[in-house]
Amino acid sequence: MTDLSPALPVNGDRLVARLKALGQIGALPEGGVCRLALTPEDGAGRDLVVGWMREQGLDVAIDPIGNIFGTRRGTQDGPSVMMGSHIDTVATGGLYDGNLGVLAGLEVLQALDDAGIATVHPVTVAAFTNEEGARFQPDMLGSLVHVGDLPLQEALDTISIDGTRLGDDLADIGYAGTAALGGIKAAAYLEYHIEQGPVLEAEGIDIGVVEGVQGISWTEITLSGRSSHAGATPMRLRRDAGLAAARIAHGVADIAKSIGGDMVGTVGSLRLRPNLVNVVAEMAQMTVDLRHPQEKVLAEAEARLAALVARVAEEEHVSFTRRQLARFQPVAFDRDLVGRVEHTARSLGLSTRRMFSGAGHDAQMLARTCPAAMVFVPSIAGLSHNTAEYTAPGDIANGLAVLGTLALELAGRANSPA
Amino acid sequence: MTDLSPALPVNGDRLVARLKALGQIGALPEGGVCRLALTPEDGAGRDLVVGWMREQGLDVAIDPIGNIFGTRRGTQDGPSVMMGSHIDTVATGGLYDGNLGVLAGLEVLQALDDAGIATVHPVTVAAFTNEEGARFQPDMLGSLVHVGDLPLQEALDTISIDGTRLGDDLADIGYAGTAALGGIKAAAYLEYHIEQGPVLEAEGIDIGVVEGVQGISWTEITLSGRSSHAGATPMRLRRDAGLAAARIAHGVADIAKSIGGDMVGTVGSLRLRPNLVNVVAEMAQMTVDLRHPQEKVLAEAEARLAALVARVAEEEHVSFTRRQLARFQPVAFDRDLVGRVEHTARSLGLSTRRMFSGAGHDAQMLARTCPAAMVFVPSIAGLSHNTAEYTAPGDIANGLAVLGTLALELAGRANSPA
């Protein structure tokens, strides 16, 4: 490995312009973007990104789950230095989540071109399919298939919240590719992402050095009671699935608060049937999202949730079923690579803070097969999965400089500095 | 008024057959019926009922809000003895709620024809528009317009949960009538209905003698928080509209249980936005249905709800708006007419129990302009607003005998018994 190279002359303004251009696809009237995985909007976003890859002369490969890889060749063959993230969004998404990691990778490659720098190792930019999990579960599906931990056929047979099959949607938008699954090997994986939380802004820190990702547990709970007249059914004779769901949602917050620290618990989705003002609900379906950096604490929260559901169901005389939608253990990133993120940022004069990610990221899947790390920059007001998601151009340029400088260092210069 | 007549020879089997025939329109695969007000299914149900009215030679009048009146003339003109209810249902309705009161009225008139009985006063069967309030609010809208307490134009401009205008839907199904509003006067109003609660069955009583209707308060509450990432947003920094809604729904049940007695409180409808597993909800919209037979207690429950909403909103850092969807004070039916229901039932050898209705009924609107009363029969397991709603044929025949016998007594025989 060569000595630390001087900072790569990346262009933050060009990156911000591309973020805005991509954000036009699926743009919402109130700002923000809705580009749910494998919808026509996602297809159009992919077309734009792949177009940029081809303009930059990259070798584009699309695998059978729709993951997109754009590779700039090195002077040697072999594993790539991989940068990447995803371009699907939640229904009320912003311009930065995921998109930043992909487009910053392209900007790094453009900066290498502009500076006339050849690298020893190939450098690849990856955009993974369905990271959000908003339309298809589990989330991080594309990177999970990429690393070989979810069979392709099972992933293709996943049914969306709209009732469609993933494989069919993928074919409809033209991204059922033929490149070999896992064919592009990574020597290291770097994911540049907004924090999606309020900590960096609150503490005035430039760069979050991500040590790992919280464990994630998603459960769907379906409660079955008895539909009855809201006026003529005494409270004691009810089997109110809606009330049971409300008590569980309330209890999930209490569990998270009583465990404290980094523990979070969320009921983001809740539906009642028949959902009418004067009818006691016969059915309620809800999701519970639990996260913590330590497996032991996460498991404790899960056990307390299970006890809560059983107790409330018994007290409200409803039956229930549970279905695990996703379960990821906490992930620790490669200690050496994390240290190099920190060192690179400091060498560029940026302040840093080590932290765990509260959100899931493709990096946690890649970490199973290669050293991986992440670079965080502040999210204003901690907003993400929100149309008002925003990161200032200066912060975007800071993270881009860290990413580009470290990627070049990892890939190795094959020619002398200009 | 004549002496008590012998029981009118009504035909319960014929009534049950008509209930089943009407229940075919909007029939659900799992049983029960969905004939929401002013949908094409409601239109088809109306066509069937009006067809039966015409077959029976009744004078059919349809007013501008779509209320249907079928009148059998008396030997004298003047106010009618009116029987009636409604034929719209909730989304998961049964065959009996409302339909029983309308079709039993037609059966009474058929029995008068079959027995060759003429009455002094006219006898009218009424089917009022949108009693349920499941698609348009407020409920009991047609009878409220009929008695003059809701302006016609305001009613016609009501917007459905589907976003359509009531007047347009009414015209689409061909029931924007031209008969004068309130043109058919009632000397008395009798509504025969299933109990919709579990009390008569539990106590083994044949006939519920309804003294009045609980007061009803419907409120829609909209909570506005901030959408944010479910993993990266610490609990203390959230503005979770979904959690606020769950706490309020939980609290509504606690208010009802702590007041006790006849108090009921229901959150039947609750929607989150964006309603995704990994996004803290930015918006929650919910309904609260409160009912009690005493105005003072109902008002206390409303005050406690208001305090609950304000407290939860403050603690969860969300804002809120409230909208009153419906508010009806408790109603006491005419004491003399209630006594005659009880006396008629007992004279027919049936057991009786005085009770308040927990549900709203058109009778409470009619009670503003004439003596009104109701006859209840058992609902098996208390089920109503439920596809499994059921009342046994023997119970249906019991109530029909009470209705027919009392209606004939009120209308007066104009010829000698055969």
Image (cartoon, coloured by chain):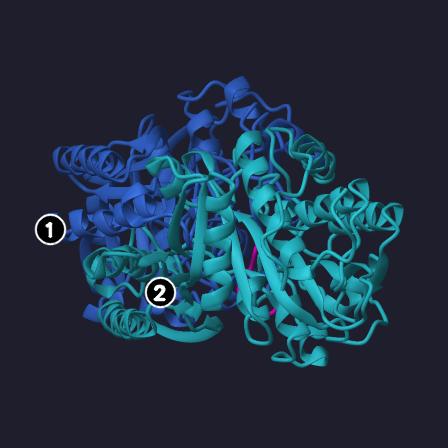
Chain colours: A blue, B cyan
Q: Is residue B178 visible?
A: yes
The answer to whether the residues at label 2 and label 1 have Cβ atoms under 8 Å apart is no
Locate residue B294, reporting x and y percent. 32, 69
- Is residue A93 visible in this depiction of the protein? no
Q: Does the magenta stretch include residue B269?
A: no
Indicate the quadrant containing the N terminus of chain A: top left, top right, bottom left or bottom right. Answer: top left
Do the residues indicated by labels 2 and 1 lie within the same chain of the protein? no
Question: Which portion, as a residue range, is magenta?
Answer: A29-34
In screen coordinates, is A324 left or right of A132?
left
Q: Which of B166 and A137 is in front in this view?
A: B166
- The residue shown at (41%, 75%) is B321
* Residue A148 drawn at (x, y percent): 42, 20
- Point out residue A81 in the picture as x, y percentages from the top left corner: 41, 37
Which numbered marker is on residue B293?
2
Q: Could you tell me which residue is drawn at 34 percent across and 36 percent down? A: B202
Task: Kindly identify which chain the residue marked by label 2 belongs to.
Answer: B
Does residue A2 lie above or below B127 as drawn? Answer: above
Density class for disc 2 (Cα within 10 Å; few <14, some 14-19, many ≥20) is many
**Quick one: A33 or A314, which is closer to the camera?**
A314
Q: Which residue is drawn at 31% across and 66% down?
A: B239
A67 versus A14 height, above or below: above
Q: Which chain carries label 1?
A: A
Q: Which mark is residue A258?
A: 1
Secondary structure of the residue carrying tag 2 is: loop
